[in-house]
Image (spheres, rainbow, N blue to C red):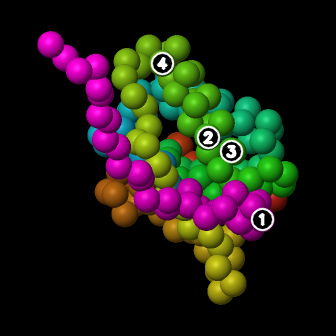
């Protein structure tokens, strides 16, 4: 006969983010990887769903999207909050894009649990980070010239 006592163990996850207020200013290069490195964005329909969700969530939160580069298994986005903060934008984007990509026919988890962020440092410019991002497909051996990669967007205000 059971005593009716249930013992539950849990491990508290280490906090890897700063306070939300910190993420309300400045520009951030964010990398979000697909779950288990699946090449979700090899499918054009899933890629389109991701871009549309990015556009919609950037208006909702709001943030300025300076640049993005979609690779087969991850996305780089250079954003700057104009109101709200980066964390709210990422949460809205990941939730919205996951829903849209599943609606387009994908079965399973789209994104890994977290994301990588890099705040623009004093010795960096937005153009420096854009340059890093647009050459990602070249470094990966997918194209010889970054201008040939169709899944890159650069905000026209940058004059890149």
Give the spatial CA distance, label 3 vs label 1. Answer: 13 Å
Q: Which residue is mark 1?
A: 25
- State the residue at coordinates (68%, 53%): 86
Q: Which residue is mark 2?
A: 91
The foreground one among 73 and 86 is 86
The answer to which of marks 3 and 1 sits earlier in the sequence is: 1
Give the spatial CA distance, label 4 vs label 2. Answer: 17 Å
Please indicate, yes or no, whether residue 71 appears anywhere in the rendered image.
no
Does 93 appear in magenta? no
The foreground one among 58 and 47 is 58
Give the spatial CA distance, label 1 vs label 2. Answer: 17 Å
Q: Nearer the viewer, mark 4 or mark 1?
A: 1
**Label 4: element kind:** helix
Q: Which residue is mark 4?
A: 102
Instruction: Give the extent of the magenta segment.
Output: 1-30
Which label belongs to residue 89?
3
Which label belongs to residue 135?
none
For the C terminus, give its image quadrant: bottom right
């Amino acid at each position: 006969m059971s005593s009716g006592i249930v013992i539950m163990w849990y491990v508290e996850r280490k906090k890897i983010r700063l306070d939300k207020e910190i993420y309300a200013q400045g520009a951030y290069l964010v990398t979000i990887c697909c779950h288990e490195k699946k090449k979700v964005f090899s499918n054009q329909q899933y890629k389109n769903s991701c871009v549309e969700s990015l556009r919609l969530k950037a208006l909702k939160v709001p943030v300025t999207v300076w640049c993005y580069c979609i690779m087969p298994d991850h996305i780089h986005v250079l954003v700057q909050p104009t109101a709200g903060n980066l964390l709210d934008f990422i949460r809205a984007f990941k939730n919205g894009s996951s829903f849209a990509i599943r609606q387009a026919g994908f079965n399973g988890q789209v994104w890994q649990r977290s994301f990588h962020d890099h705040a623009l440092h004093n010795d960096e410019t937005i153009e420096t980070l854009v340059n890093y991002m647009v050459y990602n497909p070249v470094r990966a051996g997918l194209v010889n010239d970054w201008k040939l990669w169709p899944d890159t967007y650069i905000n026209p205000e940058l004059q890149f």
